Image: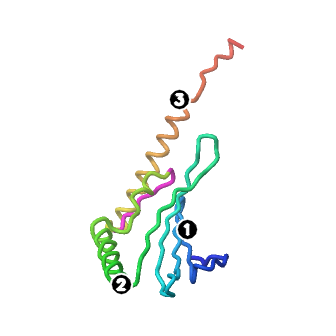
Amino acid sequence: MEERKYNDAEDIYSKILRAGRRTYFFDVRSTKAGDYYLTISESKKFTNEDGSFYFKKHKIYLYKEDFQGFNDLVKEMTQYIIDEKGLEVISERHQKDYVKEDHHSKPEETEEKEETEETEETEETKSSSEENFTDVDFDDI
């Protein structure tokens, strides 16, 4: 996380968390009475068809009287997700260069699996190159 560089009269303390297309802003602000509260803002970048972009923003205002309950529920819910689905980010599976990490298999199984995957890739590459090959008869030239 990084601190914000600008100095807004309302902002007391700020941090930024960049997460791909999303950016989270954590800002401590002051009420008119001089008490502090937290705003958590999510800003997500979108691109128009013409290449220009825009941001959608969502904001949560969190006051001191809600800190404990909010903290407790965030911890409980994040732990539930980790317990149920583990730490692997499933959306990463859809990336082109994704390789699943298998933490449960034995080292020998992993080596065999890698060799099988390499063989399959070689066969796929060979098949793909054969499909792209143009059969040329030099008598036609």
Circle nearer the N terminus (1, 2): 1
How far from the left and from the top, in percent, is residue 2? 59, 77
* 47, above or below 24, in the image: above
**Residue underneath mark 3:** 131
**Residue underneath mark 2:** 65
What is the residue that sits farthest to the front in this orientation? 32
* Front-most of residues 56 and 108: 56
SS at badge 2: helix
* 73, above or below 35, in the image: above
State left or right for residue 96 relative to residue 66.
Answer: right
At label 1, which amino acid type do we have? Arg
Q: Do the residues labelled 3 and 1 touch (CB within 8 Å)?
A: no
The quadrant the N terminus occupies is: bottom right
At label 2, which amino acid type do we have? Glu
How far from the left and from the top, in percent, is residue 84? 27, 67
Circle nearer the N terminus (3, 1): 1
Residue 67 badge: none
- Determine which quarter of the picture holds residue 110: bottom left
SS at badge 3: helix
- The residue carrying pointer 3 sits among few (fewer than 14), some (14 to 19) or many (20 or more) residues within 10 Å by Cα, namely few
Q: Give the range drawn in magenta.
A: 96-103
Q: Residue placed at 63% from the left, 77% from the top?
A: 8
- Determine which quarter of the picture holds residue 12: bottom right
At label 3, which amino acid type do we have? Glu
Residue 18 badge: 1
Give me the C-alpha separation between circle 1 and circle 2.
28 Å
* Front-most of residues 79 and 33: 33
Q: Is residue 133 magenta?
A: no
How far from the left and from the top, in percent, is residue 67? 37, 82
